Amino acid sequence: MAGPSALHRDDALPLYQQIFLALRDEILSGRRPLGENLPTEHDLSALYGVSRITARRALDELAGHGLVERRRRIGTRVIFRAPATPIEANIDQAIESLIAFGRDTQVRVVALAEEPAADHIAPRLGLAPGAATLRALRVRYLDDAPLGAIESHVPLHLSAGLTRERLTETPLLEILRESGHAIGGGTQTIAAIAADPARAALLGTEPRAPLIRIERVVHDLAGKPLLLTIAEYRGDRYRLALDLHGAARPAAD
């Protein structure tokens, strides 16, 4: 579970929102499964070094988003069921589609900085908590209007060439490939969420407006994680389409 190191006390985002987002990530990813009890207000306040009022507000936000239920004398229980079975897809086609999508839209880099990997980020990149990463936060535009916010985490030793200028002009996956990192596979989860106030402001929409959240981990040919991306797209501006086939196609020679 994310710990106190995941909180940015000098951040404009309130502490209760940061705790809410960390717990929400754990629930949506399935790391906190259906039926699991969350820590009590007292335990959360001790874990994060915040007041019980702050911890209570974070748990109330989770309940307001329909992820947990709170009952007196019983506690806070997860009621969201994370998808268990991944859909298989051709990674080459998927990567090419992502790169083409990046070229057809415009990007504004909001933040780019070296950060220690938070407890809920590190294992997904095969890193120890606190290991150095490069975090990029970008807003993607289509027809001059915000489409989505994309937060990416890359192990620092793999981040050569990831500058503001390049990220503005070139999709991140393409930069990684040009740097010599062959992409071998990836995993992706998709969920519908409600926009928190910070994301709503960034995307020019209302708090609690529907967003499509896509989390993607991309690996190299040896299965080593290269990139974790958490993208949140406006539900009124983004549509995901999949081609479904009844039988497997023969592999290319």
Image (cartoon, rainbow, N blue to C red):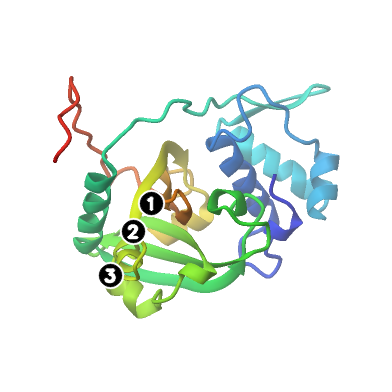
Tell me whether the residue at label 1 lies in contact with that at label 3, contact meaning CB atoms closer than 8 angstroms. Answer: no
Q: Is residue 224 left or right of residue 119?
A: left
- Disc 1 and disc 3: Cα gap in Å? 22 Å
Q: Which mark is residue 170?
A: 3
Q: Nearer the viewer, residue 89 or 253?
A: 253
Along the viewing direction, whichever of 162 and 195 lies nearer the viewer: 162
Q: Residues within 10 Å of mark 2 (few under 14, many from 20)?
A: some
Q: Which label sits on residue 182?
A: 2
- Left or right: residue 231 compared with residue 120: left
Q: Position of residue 19 (x, y in %)?
A: 67, 49
**Residue 226, percent from left and from top:** 45, 58
- Work out which quarter of the rendered image holds the C terminus and state it: top left
- Image marks 2 and 1: residues in contact by CB distance under 8 Å: yes
Image position, residue 208 (x, y; %)? 48, 43
- Secondary structure under the numbered disc 3 in the rendered image: loop
Q: Residue drawn at (63%, 40%), measured in percent from left and top?
A: 61
Task: Give the residue displayed 25% in from the left and 47% down from the top.
Answer: 92
Q: Is residue 73 left or right of residue 214?
A: right
Density class for disc 1 (Cα within 10 Å; few <14, some 14-19, many ≥20) is few
Q: Is residue 7 above or below residue 163?
A: above
Q: Nearer the viewer, mark 2 or mark 3?
A: 2
Question: Amino acid type of disc 2?
Answer: Ala
Residue at the disc numbered 1: 221
Q: Amino acid at mark 3?
A: Thr
- Image height check: is 111 above or below 232? below
Q: Is tag 2's residue or tag 1's residue first in the polypeptide sequence?
A: 2
